[in-house]
Amino acid sequence: MNAPVPRLHDWPSTTGLLGDDHEWDEHKRASNLEKHGFDFVDANRVHESPDKLTLGSARQGETKWIDLAPVKGRLLMLVYVMRGDVVRCISMRVANRKESRWYDEFKIDDTLH
């Protein structure tokens, strides 16, 4: 029987805690941790990855950003909005198939240039 895969927040951080440039609602953080197993404290692993793909979607006058990046062998998705220079985390989870395809297609296109 396979051992369960450790959650990201169970791994020691190599980049340290997020600085003043990241914020979140504590209730949303707890909800995300319970639902998806990821803590916003680790969001910098996605947001600051050199291999990330960033997509934006403007709705109701505000742009939501999606960062997709491989972390510890899994493709993770971070959803956030920018409030000035501050990244406000909304959600963080493993990317679904559709999001994984976006990432793969971007990486293929990127290697062709």
Image: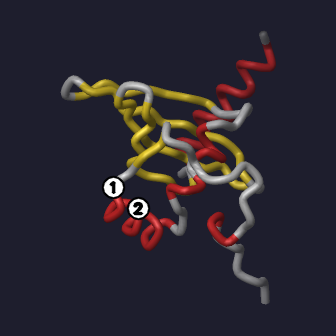
**Residue 54 placement (x, y as % from top left):** 55, 29
Residue that lies at the very extreme toward the front in this rendered image: 20
Quadrant position of the N terminus in the picture:
bottom right
Q: Circle 2 — which element?
A: helix
Residue that lies at the very extreme toward the top in this rendered image: 113
Quadrant position of the C terminus in the picture:
top right
**Residue 91 placement (x, y as % from top left):** 43, 52
**Residue 107 placement (x, y as % from top left):** 72, 28
Is residue 105 rendered to the left or right of residue 29?
Answer: right
For image coordinates 61% across by 53% down, the residue present is 17
For image coordinates 42% across by 46% down, the residue present is 23
Confirm or deny contact between disc 2 and disc 1 (CB under 8 A).
Answer: yes
Callout 2 environment at 10 Å: few (<14), some (14 to 19), or many (20+)?
A: many
Is residue 1 rendered to the left or right of residue 82?
Answer: right
Answer with the quarter of the image where residue 34 lies.
bottom left
For image coordinates 60% across by 50% down, the residue present is 76
- On residue 25, which mark appears? 1
For the residue pair 103 and 69, the one nearer the viewer reads as 69
- On residue 34, which mark appears? none
Amino acid at circle 1: Asp
- On residue 29, which mark appears? 2
Answer with the quarter of the image where residue 87 lies.
top left
Answer with the quarter of the image where residue 11 lies.
bottom right
Amino acid at circle 2: Arg
Q: Circle 1 — which element?
A: loop
For image coordinates 70% across by 54% down, the residue present is 74
Q: CA distance from mark 2 to mark 1?
A: 6 Å
Picture layout, residue 18 above or below residue 57: below
Picture layout, residue 19 above or below residue 33: above
